[in-house]
DNA sequence: GTATCTGCAAATGCTTTGCACACCC
DNA sequence: GGGTGTGCAAAGCATTTGCAGATAC
């Protein structure tokens, strides 16, 4: 089977420099102004091995002496998502979590015990979805597949279930 | 392909009476007390052809002269979800939407234009998910596949995109 | 009678927004 | 200098919770 798994993260399809350069293009095209925070948050999400939420992003910014108010973090995340630089996923009650959009198209496995998010790629599922959308005369905009599991470690620790 | 589609709703695998009888069993086993509202809300969700949110459920209860405060609706929905009578899906900003659990296992297609939710069944995707969970030594608890689309009608009306 | 269920209002948690000031071009 | 970005505090919105009274058993 052509399943690709990766416990760390799915391959990125673009370099950080390329992503940052695209950000500059959008900012310039929209006649907006450069903001160090915007670039920093985008870089942070690009480099993060985990899916951060807004609070965590604000906390890391603070730790890196790049302090940013939580409202700015929200505004910047909204901007970055609107213009396709990041995507968000809902996995728990602690708000949306973000990841860089410049990643291979993938799905998420979420452990209900420890919250760990694993990513995987499956082309068959992707193809199937396109077929389904097409058969309904729908234009597929985005898809979201989440598997909620109890991981091996949490099963052994009898964390839940 | 073995895709099953249904523009109205996916077949239910259990009668309302059977579901209500199971509710009575749980209530009795947990030494709780019968509540007409709990039964009414469960019946309402069973019979609804659309995915209702809490506000809508409260409004329909009111219209049927079975008035229920919004907090009771939330408490009852939480109860029904905890004990596996209903399941919830997140489709928009208007809160979780509920459906009866006694339905064939299925996925959702959500139109970003009109909000219409279509359900579909696909055994290949289901099998694939089980394989994936198994290959990661994970116990699959639940899965959630949402396709966000622009439906044919909304494309013609150029509602979005 | 006693524990659960309900309605109300207040609280919660994530997110958005209004406003004044700071900063980029 | 004019408009965009930011920080702060307040507001929004779905949901939860504390409490007192109502109801089921």
Image (cartoon, coloured by chain):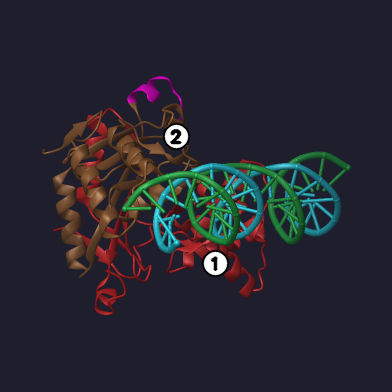
Chain colours: A red, B brown, C cyan, D green
Q: Percent from the top left, x then y, of residue A161?
A: 26, 68
Q: Percent from the top left, x then y, of residue A6?
A: 29, 67
Q: Percent from the top left, x then y, of residue A10?
A: 34, 63
User: Along the horizontal axis of the image, is A65 left or right of B81?
Assistant: right
Residue B158 falls within the magenta-colored stretch? yes
Residue A84 showing in the rendered view: no
Q: Which residue is mark 1?
A: A56
Residue at the (42%, 69%) spot, across then down: A49
Q: Which residue is mark 2?
A: B56
Q: Same chain for labels 1 and 2? Say yes or no.
A: no
Which image quadrant for residue B9?
Answer: top left
Nearest to the eye among marks 1 and 2: give it: 2
Please identify the residue farthest to the top as the structure is shown.
B157
Residue at the (33%, 48%) spot, across then down: B34
Q: Quadrant of the N terminus of chain A?
A: bottom left
Choose between A149 and D17: the one closer to the eye. Answer: D17
How far apart in space, not on screen, are marks 1 and 2 (Cα)? 34 Å
Residue B131 showing in the rendered view: yes
Residue at the (44%, 41%) spot, across then down: B54
Choose between A61 and B85: the one closer to the eye. Answer: B85
Q: Secondary structure at mark 2?
A: helix
* Magenta residue span: B152-160
Q: Residues within 10 Å of mark 1 (few under 14, many from 20)?
A: few
- Please give the chain letter of the residue carrying mark 1: A
Q: Secondary structure at mark 1?
A: helix
């Amino acid at each position: 089977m052509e399943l690709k798994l990766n416990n760390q993260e799915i391959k990125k399809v673009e370099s950080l420099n390329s992503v940052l350069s695209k950000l500059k293009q959008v900012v310039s095209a929209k006649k907006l102004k450069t903001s160090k925070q915007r670039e920093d948050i985008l870089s942070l999400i690009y480099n993060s091995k985990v899916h951060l939420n807004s609070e965590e992003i604000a906390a890391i910014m603070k730790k890196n002496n790049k302090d940013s108010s939580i409202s700015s973090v929200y505004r910047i995340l909204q901007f970055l998502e609107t213009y396709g630089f990041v995507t968000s996923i809902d996995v728990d009650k602690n708000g949306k979590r973000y990841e860089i959009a410049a990643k291979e198209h993938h799905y998420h496995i979420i452990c209900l015990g420890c919250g760990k998010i694993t990513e995987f790629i499956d082309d068959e599922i992707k193809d199937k979805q396109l077929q389904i959308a097409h058969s309904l005369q729908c234009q597929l905009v985005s898809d979201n597949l989440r598997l909620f599991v109890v991981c091996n470690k949490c099963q052994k620790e009898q964390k839940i279930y």
